[in-house]
Image (spheres, rainbow, N blue to C red):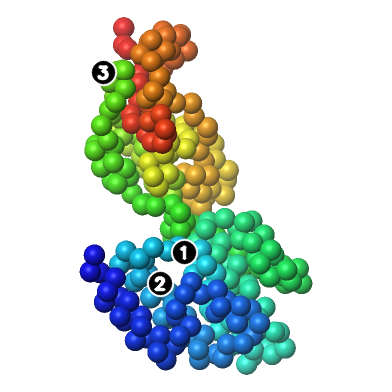
Amino acid sequence: MWAPLPMFALLGILAIPYPQLLGNGLDITEFAFSNQLPLLLMLILFVLKPLVTAGCLGSGAPGGLFTPSITYGAVFGGAMGDLWSFIWPGTPMGSYAVIGAGAVLAATMQAPLAAAVLLLELTHNTMAIMVPILLAIAGAIITARLLDMRSIDSGPASIQPFIEQIARRPLHTAFNDLITPSLNIVPVSASYSQLVYWMTADNAPQNLYVLDHSGKLVGVISSEKLWTADALTRTMGIAAAFDLKMPVTAIRSDQSRKEVLNLLQQPSFSQTPVVEGVTMQYMGIIKKPEV
């Protein structure tokens, strides 16, 4: 309850000389795109803006990271472009800000095409520099994926938070005794190398169930899918679990025991995940009984 108070006090003090730190950064982005920010101010904002954004959100203040990501990229690209203009003058500074915004947005969202389209929609005037924007986005995506697969919506990178969620989640089904609390789960941001490690460990599972940041089941990765990934993924490991997942059919907790028992009797049945009926959060698996 008290954490936001010192953070907001610090932000208020910093905002006296630098009022641009207040808000989500939309005004800073507009000024950077239109070449209305001096180099020194962009360098200062490049350092302070992400720090105060992280501090405010980390202290518990509500907010998002979408617009701050664009702002950070805009001041970073604008500052680098301003410095570059001393060597090679002639290009409008606003173009560098747009390119920087696209690169950082693509890396934080882990969505290169969406970042390019959003820039096009936001500025209505990026076609002339679309090639450098796409090159910057490609470089940013590869770099980000080599360092960290998570996006601003991915949630935790480890499976421990999901294990704790599942351990705390009570079972309210008509077939509790049939559910096995299997932990063959991975977050959507798990890297290719992590998936390979889990799939090659002792007693490795045949399937890994992919969960989003809320614990919702979003797909499954089979060992076959992992070994047949494209050459770029297998060489550089730049794919995440979200890229490799396949659709999966799950039993819902609100289904009747009779439905589940009928499913167990089907010859093709081996195992199926179980999810909560409303939230679709992962609960465990049901296996075919051994004869």
Residue at 58%, 73% (x, y): give it. Answer: 100
Residue at 57%, 49% (x, y): give it. Answer: 232
Secondary structure of residue under mark 1: loop
| 1 or 3: tag closer to the N-terminus | 1
Secondary structure of residue under mark 2: helix
Type of residue at label 2? Answer: Thr
| 2 or 1: tag closer to the N-terminus | 2
**Quick one: label 2, few (<14), some, or many (20+) residues within 10 Å?**
many
49 in relation to 223, above or below:
below
**Quick one: label 3, few (<14), some, or many (20+) residues within 10 Å?**
few
Q: Is residue 223 visible?
A: no
Dots 2, 1 in contact, CB < 8 A: yes
Q: Which residue is mark 2?
A: 53
Type of residue at label 3? Answer: Asp
145 in relation to 90, above or below:
above
Point out which mark residue 65 bears: 1
Q: Which residue is mark 3?
A: 177
